[in-house]
């Protein structure tokens, strides 16, 4: 019996149409298992919201909702499950990069420049976070955005730690997949820098559409800024740090301030 030759690893495949088809299929699969699927869900949710007989500003978009009200230990188990599940696409991306002969380091996802990455991230967070909050408040007042409820978790000891974990999970997932990995694959497919920029930004905005037009536009702008900075710095870690700081401030700040300040909308 003649044995078939073993298949070549992806990183040994010759360049050309076959290589591009494989990369394109891989990219679609990763997005379909992660933030691309979230974008489709967000679109359906947005259509649902705008076709109701209720103004967008009178509807809620809940984040970090309780999964088992009145049962805090079961709720905690659910929250930790969601955080763990949320980073699995990053594990998949890491595996795929290893198969091509590199690693997540090629995206600048490592701890080699901790202080530099954190400093840059804090600066970006200060600019993006403040602008985003103003856009959210303004778009909600204009009737273009739902009321975003960053936390629906019970007032128990693990609420703040889980909110911080959720913020970090969001940051790692989005910046590794939609910034580093997506930009790398589209570059390898021969897309122009402008097309890559627009695609990454629109994908980022798409899975925030459930919040309304303001959430979509704000995240598209954030996506443009992040791609430009990624091109300049060659690392996703500053944007991971910025995103984690923005979300942590939003989640924890909401818990501490809601009901105490008049400018912060509540459901």
Image (spheres, rainbow, N blue to C red):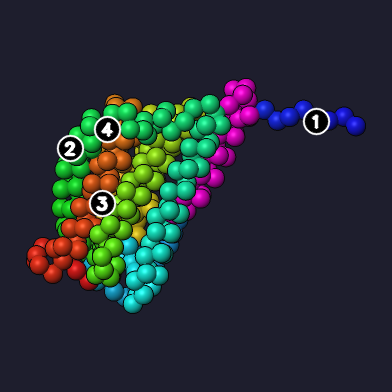
Which tag, 3 or 1, sits closer to the chain's start? Answer: 1
Q: Residue furthest bottom?
A: 70
Is residue 56 in sight in this rendering?
no
Q: Nearer the viewer, mark 2 or mark 4?
A: 4
Q: CA distance from mark 2 to mark 4?
A: 14 Å
Residue neighbourhood size for the residue with mark 4, other residues' Cα within 10 Å, grouped as few (<14), some (14–19), many (≥20) = few
Q: CA distance from mark 3 to mark 2?
A: 14 Å
Residue sitting at x 45%, y 43%: 90
In the rendering, which numbered label is found on residue 184? none
Q: CA distance from mark 3 to mark 1?
A: 52 Å
Q: CA distance from mark 2 to mark 1?
A: 56 Å
Q: CA distance from mark 1 to mark 4?
A: 48 Å
Q: Nearer the viewer, mark 1 or mark 4?
A: 4
Whether residue 238 sits left or right of residue 191 in the image: it is left
Is residue 258 in sight in this rendering?
yes
Q: Quadrant of residue 199?
A: top left
Residue that badge 2 annotates: 123
Residue 137 pos. (x, y %)? 17, 58
In the rendering, which numbered label is found on residue 4? 1
Quadrant (top left, top right, bottom left, bottom right) of the N terminus:
top right
Residue sitting at x 16%, y 42%: 127
Secondary structure at badge 1 equals: loop
Secondary structure at badge 3 equals: helix
Residue that badge 3 annotates: 247
Residue sitting at x 33%, y 77%: 70
Residue 212 pos. (x, y %)? 30, 59
In the rendering, which numbered label is found on residue 114? 4
């Amino acid at each position: 019996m003649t044995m078939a030759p073993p298949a070549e690893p992806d990183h040994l495949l010759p360049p050309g149409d076959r290589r591009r088809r494989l990369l394109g299929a891989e990219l679609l699969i990763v997005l379909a298992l992660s933030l691309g699927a979230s974008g489709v869900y967000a679109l359906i949710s947005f259509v649902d919201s705008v076709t109701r007989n209720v103004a967008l500003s009178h509807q809620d978009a809940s984040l970090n909702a309780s999964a088992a009200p009145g049962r805090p230990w079961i709720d905690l188990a659910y929250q930790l499950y969601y955080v763990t599940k949320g980073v699995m696409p990053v594990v998949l991306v890491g595996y795929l990069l290893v198969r091509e002969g590199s690693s997540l380091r090629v995206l600048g996802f490592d701890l080699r420049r901790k202080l530099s990455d954190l400093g840059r991230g804090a600066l970006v967070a200060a600019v993006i976070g403040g602008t985003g909050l103003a856009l959210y408040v303004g778009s909600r007042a204009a009737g273009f955005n739902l009321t975003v409820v960053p936390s629906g978790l019970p007032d128990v000891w693990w609420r703040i730690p889980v909110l911080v974990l959720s913020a970090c999970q969001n940051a790692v997932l989005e910046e590794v997949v939609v910034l580093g990995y997506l930009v790398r694959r589209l570059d390898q497919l021969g897309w122009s820098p402008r097309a890559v920029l627009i695609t990454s930004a629109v994908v980022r905005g798409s899975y925030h559409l459930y919040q309304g037009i303001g959430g979509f536009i704000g995240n598209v702008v954030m996506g443009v800024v992040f791609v430009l900075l990624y091109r300049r710095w060659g690392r996703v870690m500053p944007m991971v740090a910025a995103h984690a700081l923005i979300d942590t401030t939003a989640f924890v700040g909401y818990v501490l301030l809601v009901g105490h300040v008049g400018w912060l909308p509540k459901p």
